[in-house]
Image: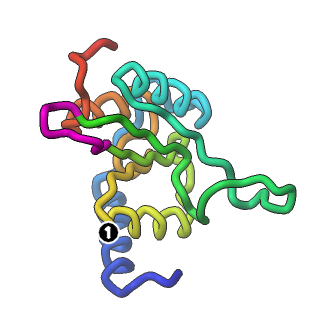
Amino acid sequence: MNWTEEQLAEWIRQRQMEKENPLPAPSSASDDPEDLIEAECTSLLEQDGWRALRTDPVSDRSRGKGFGEIGMADHLYMRPRKGPDAGANAEVLWIEYKRYRGPVRKGQIEWHTRERGRGFATWIAGIDFVASVAGFQTHYEKSGLMRRARWW
């Protein structure tokens, strides 16, 4: 899918802002691999009532394996809404995990841009939060999605 001029302008603006105001390096987790960050953050979200579903790479369809779309986030998190008017509604959160300074591919940006345009919450490590467990924790606390009092 090609980007619209508006999406491309926003992407360029974000990159320029990152160069001018880069995310601070995480204090002790700068060398943590992506899978460790993903596992720790998923555990934290599950403790807060989220159900985690790991997406498979689309690129492995040759073996009949794969679920999703090109650029799709690593994880889908869902949980029922709380409250008397919640009904059958659910909260949905997509997260793309990266190691610190891990590259974000164009297809991933395009996918997240589309999903955000549809009204879904999507986060990309290294863009929306510092790519570390501590960076995720800070972002999650400020997001308004955290139900439990801070437990970490």
Residue ID at (36%, 33%): 135
Q: Is residue 86 highlighted in magenta?
A: yes
| Residue 23 spot, x, y in % from top left | 35, 45
Q: Residues within 10 Å of mark 1 (few under 14, many from 20)?
A: few
4 vs 25, nearest the viewer = 4
Please give the residue where the numbered disc 1 appears in the rendered image: 117
x and y, in percent, of residue 103 in the image: 56, 55
What kind of residue is marked 1? Gly
Q: Position of residue 74 (x, y in %)?
A: 55, 46
Q: What residue is rendered at 30% in x and 12% in y?
A: 151
> Is residue 47 covered in magenta?
no
Q: How is the image coloured?
A: rainbow
Rendering coords of residue 131 (x, y %) = 45, 39
Q: Residue at 37%, 33% (x, y): give it.
A: 136
Q: Main secondary structure of the magenta part?
A: loop
Who's the residue at 35% across and 43% down the image?
129
Q: What secondary structure is found at the residue carrying circle 1?
A: helix
Farthest residue to the left: give it. 84
Classify the position of the C terminus by image quarter. top left
Give the side of residue 152 with respect to residue 32, left or right.
left
Q: Answer above or below: position of 80 versus 70.
A: above
Residue closer to the observer: 118 or 141 = 118
Displayed quadrant of residue 68: bottom right
Report the residue that reaches farthest toward the front: 87
Start-end of magenta stretch: 82-90
Residue furthest to the right in view is 63
In the rendered image of this protein, does residue 19 appear above or below residue 139? Answer: below
Q: Nearer the viewer, residue 140 or 146?
A: 146
